[in-house]
Amino acid sequence: MYIIETKNLTKRYNNLNAVDKLNLQIEEGEIFGLLGPNGAGKTTTLLMLTTLKQPTSGTATINNFDIIKQPDKVRKSIGIVFQDPSSDEILTGYENLKLHGWLYDMPDDLREQRIKEVLELVDLTDRKDDRVKKYSGGMRRRLELARGLMHHPHVLFLDEPTLGLDPQSRDVIWKYIEKLAKEKNITIIITTHYMDEADKLCNRLAIIDRGKIVVLGTPKELKKILGGDIIRLKAENLDDEVYKNLKYVKKVSKCDSELCLTVEDANKHLQEILRITGKIDSVEIRSPTLDDVFLYHTGRGIREGSPEGSWADKAMNMRSGR
Amino acid sequence: MSEFKGIYALWYREAKVFLRERSRVISSIINPILWLLIIGGGLGSAVTFSGTFKDINYQTFIYPGILIQTALFSSIFFGVYIVWDKKIDFMKEVLVAPIRRTSLFVGKILGGSTDTLIQIIILLIIGFIFTSIGIMTGLNLNIISIIISMAFLFVTTVGLVSIGLIIGSQMESPEGFQLITSFLIFPLFFLSGALFPISNLPPWLAPFIFVNPITYSVDGIRGALIGKSQFFLPEDFVIVCIFTIIMILIGTYAFKKMKI
């Protein structure tokens, strides 16, 4: 049984499908990434799964509850950290958590115990009585992460958890997410457009573009589709023909004065390649990144977005402009 | 049970925030005092009543109107906070919690009413002080008159907070909210008889005043505090209650339809 299963989940704005017949199965305990450029339909998917938006057609189940027929039960099973700040600045960190405990109808002693627990988890115990106004961006995100966990959800949704944070705060947040998945056996769904984030955190991920899944798999599998590592060679006399006979070389291409080889398991075969090449000026081995994967499947870089501008943004604009 | 806790949580937040923002409390009190002293004192020197309110000092006459003015501004304006909640993701945090939207509406009403009623109580104390030192005369402040006035003010406030929330739930920007509400607040105030008696009105003006629910609230409070009113007090109260019930019904519907 899957913890999350979507069945032809679709959201239409006018004639645009922001999410188009999405079919996903997610296992319990996974960290699953939804990747895509801004406006690919990630947040819309998340809002539908968290019962905040009604799907146009199709449905999904979370923890065996239907998002359309049993929204209350779905809500009790999930926690969510939103993209924008969602805590009250004038209240203290502790008060924000207490509010959350009340909203989720937790008994008083359990609530206090959990507040203590999650504050420790995100290292905010010392700052719990400060107003959220005085928190940094990273601290605020950590507080909201703690809040999302307080009621021990089966599934935790994180919408762009490190958007707009500095590199150090990102590392800290990543550390907590990994800790959570390991210690609490929570299924975590992350949306992001940072490829390194997805690569580092996710067990499996789906690349979404224009509301559709482009490709799905483990980060390793996805990168494997590209055929291997990339070796760049710089030497005086380069003859691309000699490499073409090697079985493990998938692709040979010239880039300027250098030669790019796509090689299966480059670490193992590097020595032989160097021997064949002879005298060499420089060599560079690079593992393919998810950026390369995205580029491979969509024909453009992830940061570029779609050529006509953000997909869902456009859909939303059309709706509000009506 | 869970719904009550959720409502309590929302009320707690509004009350805490209100009390922490001292400037909001103070500025909300300054304005009515200026009205009472300057408009009341200045116009009062030129106005003498005949008929129902004969021998009543003008300042005393408008005091119930100023109470309602505070309720109007503070209650309707409270709706802007829901626009802010929507602008950040706080609203989503509440909507994704396992409580009903009706509970969200009720929690917000209680929060907004608490804010307003705190201001009203401060104004009642100021009224008491002004009466003691002789600035206002003939104000009838005792337990019964205060309970009746508070009953009127509470019901009216709930209705007005609902109006603010209805508008707030449908608006996307705080600026838009302010524009719409100022078109609403001023007519409701000026057409309520807060500043003048509503007998012997020009015939073109009278209908506007009689369809305004706030008129009956002002009249009721005036009846309680001065002992003189245009209508029968229970009638006033029934009309105010009907107004508030209708606003609550519309508000519940508006919250169910609210988009994020």
Image (cartoon, coloured by chain):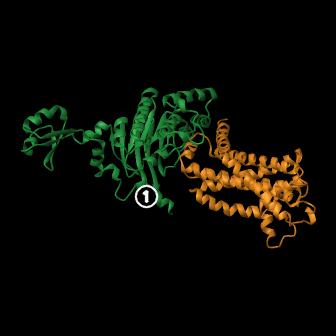
Q: Nearer the viewer, residue A79 or A65?
A: A79
Q: Nearer the viewer, residue A13 or A239?
A: A239
Q: Residue at x 10, y 43 (%)?
A: A235
Residue B53 versus residue A106 in the image, above or below: below
- Indicate the chain on which mark 1 is placed: A
**Circle 1 residue:** A314
Q: Nearer the viewer, residue B123 or A251?
A: B123
Q: Is residue B243 left or right of residue A20?
A: right
Q: Choose top left, top right, bottom left or bottom right for residue B8.
A: top right
Q: Which chain is orange?
A: B
Q: Residue at x 69, y 62 (%)?
A: B184
Residue A207 position in % (x across, y down):
35, 45
Residue B60 position in % (x across, y down):
86, 57
Q: Is residue A198 left or right of residue A47?
A: left
- State the SS at label 1: helix
Q: Choose top left, top right, bottom left or bottom right for residue B185.
A: bottom right
Residue B213 position in % (x across, y down):
78, 59
Which residue occupies the extreme front position in the image? B133
Quarter of the image that includes the N terminus of chain B: top right
Q: Which chain is green?
A: A
The 10 Å Cα crowd at callout 1, few under 14, some 14 to 19, many 20 or more, is some
Q: How many marks?
A: 1
Residue A138 position in % (x across, y down):
46, 39
Q: Choose top left, top right, bottom left or bottom right for residue B35.
A: bottom right
Q: Residue at x 61, y 50 (%)?
A: B82
The reply to whether residue B248 is visible in this rendering is: no
Q: Amino acid at mark 1?
A: Lys
The reply to whether residue B190 is visible in this rendering is: yes
Residue A28 versus residue A13 in the image, above or below: above
